Image: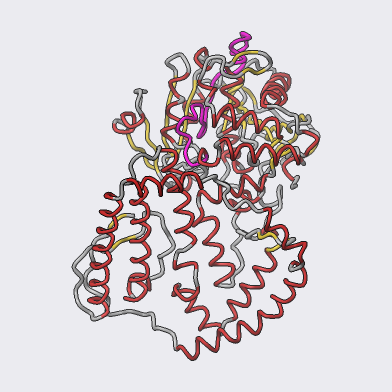
Amino acid sequence: MTNAQNSNKPSDEQAFKMPDPVALGQALVDAYEKAQPLFNDYIGKYGSADSMDQFSSIDFDPMNVQDSYMEFLDRIAKDPSKFMEVQAQHAQDWMNLWQDSINKFMGQTTEHTPIAPEKGDRRFKAPEWQENALFDFIKQSYLLTCNHMEKTIEDVDGLSKNKKEKLNFQTKLFTDAMSPTNFMMTNPEVLNETMKTGGQNLVKGFENLMSDIKDGKLNIRTTDNTAFELGKNIAMTKGQVVHQNDMMQLIQYEPTTDKVHKTPLLIIPPWINKYYILDLRPGNSLIEWAVAQGHTVFVISWVNPDATLAQKQFENYMNEGILESLTQIENITGEAQTNAVGYCLGGTLLATTLSYLTQNKQDNRIASATFLTTLLDFEHAGDMKLFLDDAQLDVLDEMMDKHGVLDGKEMQKTFSLMRANDLIWSFVVNNYLMGREPFPFDLLYWNDDCTNMPAAMHRFYLRNMYQDNKLIEAGGIDVNDTPVDLSIIKTPRHFISAREDHIAPWKATYEGVGLMSGDNVTFTLAASGHIAGVVNPPVKNKYCYWTNDKIPKAADEWLDNAEQHDGSWWPAWDKWVSDFGGGEVAARKVGKGIEAAPGSYVKVRR
């Protein structure tokens, strides 16, 4: 947590009034009476012994954190001195907070700098959290406790870095859940709404909760899924599916310029999500924008697999994805080279493919390679690694062996836990306490449109990349019986990472830059995170990005000497990739394909 400047003088315009306890009590009674039939109906549907048996199969330690907690307690017992120091400091901080709160209640000046939420924490944005002495105390006592719990873990000697990270993550999940914003009686916005509606917000919230529970399982709605239709108001860029196989559909987009670059552009998205994150809507689409810059754009739309594709391997994504796409693009355009863009996992696959092509003396098929938020060295791969120790991978293996795939909802849950306040608790408050419907938001519609992972591929990826980090080893993995060696790759390349990326931390992606050969390499760092850092159209003039002509070994050194630029990185990247465009030719008209973009594969939900 960070400290804010001390506004010691309490405001004279404290708009929030503590609710009339009689009126509030009546509103709660009314809400209870109206919600009771809904609750009874739910119990009738899901309250049977068979339905309740499902709770016996729930894994209450999905992160396998029990051993870490036991060792943590053992370390404290053996050397309690630091623990006692932290407790003493915590007691002193509480005394200071208590004294300041009394002073604020009495309209007097406070002595200490108040505790403020971290940058980007939107839970306490309502003015009552600052202006009302009671809610300010509730907020600060919560933040103080969070700080104390974090410091308690950090100051224990003898715990490995991984175990501390796991404990910190699990503790943060707990403190996020216990935030006063998540409870009616300690959230001023909810109290205001309850008084205003006579408790109708709670009744509506209970209705929302019941509708989100399907077969006894809770699936919190984050957006209005009925507000979007692929090809109608999302994924709208015009094009045709020009080829398909079991693994993907290849889309070619219609030109919007008279002239185009001679060398076509292939975008390889991750298959953990669907490609249209890069084509959300007009004006917010990297695909649409690239077409407008004169690129002949092709995009792979991956299949959403079922159990029939359980045995598809990582190399199948290379063979039936990138390699087959290159062949089709060469046949359609008559060009021998393609500029390739890999996003996230798509970038990891692109690097693997470049090694394979180089081994087989075909590396000239790719003129340049762009890696968007791509991990190649997984040593410091962020919070995802906290979910992937041996015990957790064994559980995933068992799950995938049973179903043939890893259900996309499981991956979605993991990503949601990594940003629980934004992707879980904000919607608990909005949907269930405020009684509101989630707002139609294309990004969250895409986030909810998750895809399955074939068992064989996902097992290979998690164990060889995340767990054992074999991609950085020459011959660490094989594809098509060919050892992968990133060091032989000399293709011109541009790495673009995002500074606040929690899925592919930028310093971890930077470690992959030096794994290849040749000096034609560029690294760009965008502001914001894994999605917003990539999908940032120039017209919005949002955020910024950093560049540096040199590529030092250390990421921090790169940033210390980097130049900051306002706005989107897209134009700078387009200038770079256009150097490999091969001149201009007349725009290529797209012939009649199998079906119109966005195709049918992307529409499959399982």
The residue nearer to you, when weighing 125 against 315, is: 315
Residue drawn at 34 percent across, 46 percent down:
78
Residue 107 in the image: state x and y as whole percent: 23, 80
Provide residue 389's location: percent of width, then percent of height. Answer: 55, 37
Q: Who's the residue at 61% across and 35% down the image? A: 270
In the rendered image, the quadrant that contains the N terminus is bottom left
Q: Is residue 128 left or right of residue 444?
A: left
Residue 364 percent location from the top left of the image: 59, 13
Of 345 and 70, which appears nearest the observer?
70
Q: Is residue 498 left or right of residue 344?
A: left
Numbered disc total? 0
Question: From the viewer's perspective, is residue 311 above or below residue 238?
Answer: above
Question: Toward the viewer: 37 or 490?
Answer: 37
Residue furthest front in the image: 78
Residue depicted at 69% across the width and 39% down the height: 398
Q: Is residue 4 magenta?
A: no
Q: Residue at x 77, y 33 (%)?
A: 309
Q: Quick check: 106 left or right of 147?
A: left
Image: magenta residue range? 356-384
Q: Can residue 362 be found in the magenta stretch?
A: yes
Q: Position of residue 7 (x, y in %)?
A: 23, 67
Would you say 475 lies left or right of 48 here? Answer: left
